[in-house]
Image: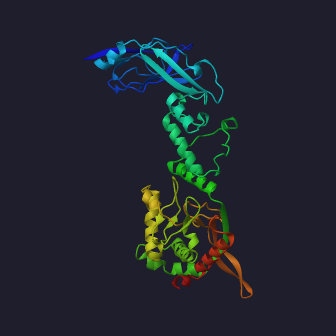
């Protein structure tokens, strides 16, 4: 046998006309005792009104935006006989204490506890004034306290800018992505100022693409965690370029475009074999260097949505034509947004080539967990002094950024000089 029971707003102390900002239940839904029926918000705080007993929601008498006071009828519940019997028992008389956070502004370190008695139901909620001006429910505020989060720094995505649980989760994920799990890696940096640029002239807001948002988090994290050093050098690729052009027709017959990048990939593998520390990762505790026996090269690809880094695996085991074909396929997948997460994992070294665009040099950011990245700019003819005269040579600018915790300056210089020599004379790859 079941009974219909009315649930009314309990005594809210000296607060009247509190606004309903959320109704997390629906008609026909079965709920448990103490489950939130509605969430109220006043000028200073918010609180949940829980169900006095388990039951099924038959009717909701209010809606979001309504203002309610003590005794207002909010929900009609269908409860079982056991719950009805419990309700008929007289509740122990307890003192009614208004929620402290609704009466006064507490000190920043104080926690105000409210106990409200209505019929047979004692409602308890814990609130502090952390983020008093922020719209958030008691559960969200409790989570924020547990994790030491400042609600004033979190942008709410709920109704009327209300901070919900998902906002806390996203905020924590963002901070972990930016600063990692190590202490002292930038977690105390001040945030950028919020400026209304429209006061200076006409503006337009354009949302960042999903790829750019993700890239921003990773790049910021990598920049904060890695002590970067960048080494520069030029490689004479005059003979290499002559050989590449001579083989262009042969490659075309196999429907392959032989680009300079595949030669750079092969030269990089040769250099990695000579300098194993560049083909490694630093352990999470910073105590060990994990040397990799494979040669998977990440290639930065420019797409309309932003930068992505697919990985070409086992570069040491593939021919120039095989690499050229695979590179073309992967680049096309990237531009069509068809790359899977597996396509962008497992790199041991990264190459970012801007040779097709231009520029003379840049400082690429190490792509963790790699310890080094090679930047390539546009090749140009420059006069080189040889055998007593200046002659034009095609020079390729190289920019090597590396993790200074793993690689020192002398080793970085040796690597880039060796790499330049490999590009200047591709016969070294056969040795």
Q: How many marks?
A: 0
Relative to 398, say whether 95 is above or below: above
| Residue that protrudes farthest toward the right in the picture | 388
Q: Is residue 389 left or right of residue 417?
A: right
Residue 271 in picture, x, y percent from top left: 57, 76
Colour mapping used in the image: rainbow
| Residue that protrudes farthest toward the front in the picture | 92
Residue 307 visible in the shown view: yes
In the foreground, 260 or 245? 260
Residue 329 in picture, x, y percent from top left: 43, 65
Residue 173 in picture, x, y percent from top left: 53, 45
In the foreground, 144 or 326? 144
In the foreground, 3 or 299? 3
- Residue at horizontal 56%, vertical 60%? 367
Q: Quadrant of the N terminus?
A: top left
Residue 373 position by quadrant: bottom right
Residue 365 position by quadrant: bottom right
| Residue that protrudes farthest toward the left in the picture | 1
In the foreground, 331 or 193? 193
Residue 326 in picture, x, y percent from top left: 43, 68
Residue 318 visible in the shown view: no
Relative to 244, say whether 344 is above or below: above
Relative to 36, say whether 193 is above or below: below
Q: Is residue 223 left or right of residue 35?
A: right
| Residue that protrudes farthest toward the bottom in the picture | 387
- Residue at horizontal 50%, vertical 70%? 292
Q: Is residue 377 left or right of residue 19?
A: right
């Amino acid at each position: 046998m079941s009974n219909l029971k009315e649930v009314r707003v309990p005594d809210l102390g000296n607060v009247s006309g509190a606004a309903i900002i959320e109704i997390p239940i629906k008609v026909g839904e079965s709920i448990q005792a103490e489950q939130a029926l509605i969430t109220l918000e006043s000028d200073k705080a918010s609180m949940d009104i829980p169900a006095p007993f388990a039951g099924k929601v038959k009717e909701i008498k209010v809606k979001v935006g309504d203002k309610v006071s003590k005794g207002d009828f909010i929900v009609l519940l269908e409860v079982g006989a056991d719950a009805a019997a419990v309700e008929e028992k007289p509740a122990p008389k307890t003192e009614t204490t208004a929620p402290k956070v609704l009466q006064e502004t507490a000190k920043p370190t104080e926690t105000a506890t409210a106990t409200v008695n209505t019929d047979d139901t004692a409602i308890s909620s814990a609130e502090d004034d952390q983020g008093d001006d922020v719209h958030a429910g008691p559960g969200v505020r409790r989570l924020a306290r547990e994790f030491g989060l400042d609600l004033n720094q979190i942008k709410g995505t709920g109704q009327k800018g209300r901070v919900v649980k998902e906002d806390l989760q996203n905020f924590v994920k963002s901070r972990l992505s930016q600063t990692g799990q190590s202490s002292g890696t930038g977690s105390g940096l001040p945030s950028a100022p919020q400026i209304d640029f429209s006061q200076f002239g006409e503006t337009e807001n354009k949302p960042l693409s999903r790829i750019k948002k993700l890239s921003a988090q990773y790049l910021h994290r990598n920049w904060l965690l890695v002590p970067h050093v960048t080494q520069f050098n030029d490689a004479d690729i005059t003979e290499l370029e002559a050989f590449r052009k001579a083989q262009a027709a042969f490659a075309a017959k196999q429907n392959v475009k032989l680009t300079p990048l595949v030669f750079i990939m092969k030269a990089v593998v040769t250099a990695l074999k000579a300098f194993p520390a560049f083909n490694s990762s630093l352990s999470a505790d910073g105590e060990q260097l994990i040397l990799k026996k494979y040669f998977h090269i990440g290639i930065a690809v420019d797409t309309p949505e932003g930068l992505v880094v697919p990985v070409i695996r086992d570069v040491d085991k593939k021919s120039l034509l095989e690499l050229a074909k695979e590179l073309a396929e992967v680049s096309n997948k990237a531009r069509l947004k068809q790359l899977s997460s597996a396509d962008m994992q497992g790199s041991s070294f990264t190459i970012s080539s801007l040779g097709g665009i231009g520029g003379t040099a840049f400082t690429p950011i190490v792509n963790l967990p790699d310890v080094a990245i090679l930047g390539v700019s546009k090749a140009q003819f420059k006069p080189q002094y040889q055998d007593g005269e200046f002659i034009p040579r095609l020079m390729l600018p190289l920019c090597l950024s590396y993790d200074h915790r793993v690689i020192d300056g002398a080793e970085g210089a040796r690597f880039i000089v060796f790499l330049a020599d490999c590009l200047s004379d591709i016969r070294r790859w056969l040795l």
